[in-house]
Amino acid sequence: MRKHIQTESEWQEQMSEKIIDQLQCELYMDMPFMKIALSALSPKANEQLTSMASDGTYIYYNPQRLMDTFRKNGKYLDRAYLHSVLHCLFFHLWTRGGRNELLWNTACDIMVEYTIDGMDKPCTRRILSYIRK
C-alpha cells in the first residue's frame, strides 16, 4: 500500500489550522475569560477571501494569505481573529434587519475595533494614529 503524498494545498490547510490554533492560544493567554468564544468557531478554508470572516459557525480563511500574513505580521492575525469573534458575540451577523448593509457593516467594524483597542491586551495592541484615537 502506497503512502499518501501530501499536496501543496493539503499542506497549506494543515499549516493554516496550526496557525489558527496558535492564534487561539495567544488570545487565550491574554484573555482567559474569552476561552469558550475563542474556540467556538471551526476553521474552514476559503481561497476567495482576503482576510478572515465568520458566519457564526466557521472562521473562514484563505490558507495562502494566512501563511503570508503570519510570516510578515503575525500580530495582525490575532486582531483579525478576535475581530471576527467579537462580531459574533455582539450579534452583528444577525441583527442588521432592514438597515443599509454598508453603513451597518462599517458601524459594526468601528465598534469592534474600538472594543479591541479598549481592551489594550498585548496580543492585539497596536500604535493608534491621531485620527483613530
Image (spheres, rainbow, N blue to C red):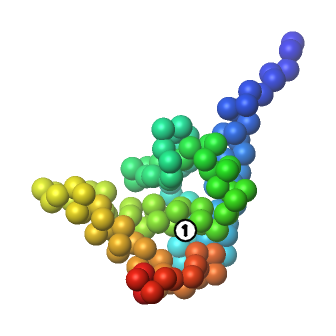
Q: With respect to residue 58, does 7 lie above or below?
A: above
Q: Residue at x 24, y 63 (%)?
A: 104
Q: Residue at x 22, y 55 (%)?
A: 101
Q: Tell me the quarter of the image containing the C terminus.
A: bottom left
The residue under label 1 is 79
Q: How many marks?
A: 1
Residue 42 visible in the picture: yes
Taking the view exactly as shown, the residue that stands out farthest to the front is 130
Residue 21 horizontal/vertical position (percent)? 67, 57
Left or right for 54, reference 6: left
Q: Name the residue: 64% across, 68% down.
A: 75
Image position of 128 with respect to 87: above or below: below
Residue at image location 45% in from the left, 61% down from the top: 84
Q: Is residue 92 left or right of residue 1?
A: left
Image quarter of residue 19: bottom right
**Secondary structure beneath disc 1?**
helix
In the rendering, at what x and y percent does residue 58 appear? 47, 48
Q: Position of residue 73 (x, y in %)?
A: 67, 63
How busy is the neighbourhood of tag 1: few (under 14 within 10 Å), some, or many (20 plus)?
many
Instruction: Check the image and name the residue furthest to the left.
Output: 98
Q: Tell me residue 69's x, y (percent).
A: 64, 55
What kind of residue is marked 1?
A: Arg
Res 17 seen here: no
- Give the quadrant of residue 71: bottom right
Would you say 49 lies left or right of 65 here? left
Task: Quadrant for the N terminus, please.
Answer: top right
Judge by depth and name the residue closer to the eye, 37 or 117. Answer: 117
